[in-house]
Amino acid sequence: ALDSALETDALICAICAAPMILGKRGILRGKNATCFPGFEEYLEGATVGGRAVRDGQVITAVGMGAALEFGIEIVAALKGREEADKLFAAVLAK
């Protein structure tokens, strides 16, 4: 499934410890990414930092505490930043 996603430029999203799979596969090499603290060593070739990070077709996040930011980055990738910002404001207003 990852190979197919890479070939078609589909969105690849991973949160918590899951980005380590992308790192071990070499998908994060040369990209900005993040993961659950303590798993950074597995993000081979990535620049690590942030809570929810998008670099091209890859979106990563540190864990459950960043789930909202992760979701907003996914919405931004699919629907655009303006729609993502509206959603974020609506969620915070409730």
Image: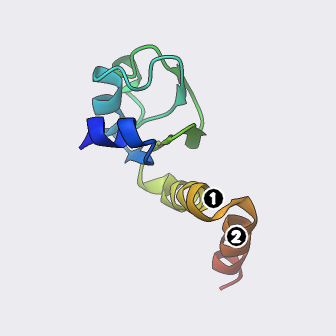
Q: Residue at x 57, y 40 (%)?
A: 53
**Near-viewer residue (59 or 49):** 59
The relative height of residue 74 versus residue 32 in the rendered view (above or below) is below
Q: Position of residue 73 (x, y in %)?
A: 58, 54
- Residue placed furthest toward the bottom: 94
Q: Amino acid at mark 2?
A: Glu
Q: Residue at x 23, y 44 (%)?
A: 1
Identify the element where label 2 is drawn: helix
Q: CA distance from mark 1 to mark 2?
A: 7 Å
Q: Give the label on residue 76, or none.
A: 1
Q: Position of residue 87 (x, y in %)?
A: 66, 74
Quadrant assignment, res 3: top left
The relative height of residue 29 versus residue 84 in the rendered view (above or below) is above
Q: Give the label on residue 83, or none.
A: 2
Quarter of the figure with the C terminus: bottom right
Assess whether mark 2 and mark 1 are in contact (beta carbons under 8 angstroms): yes
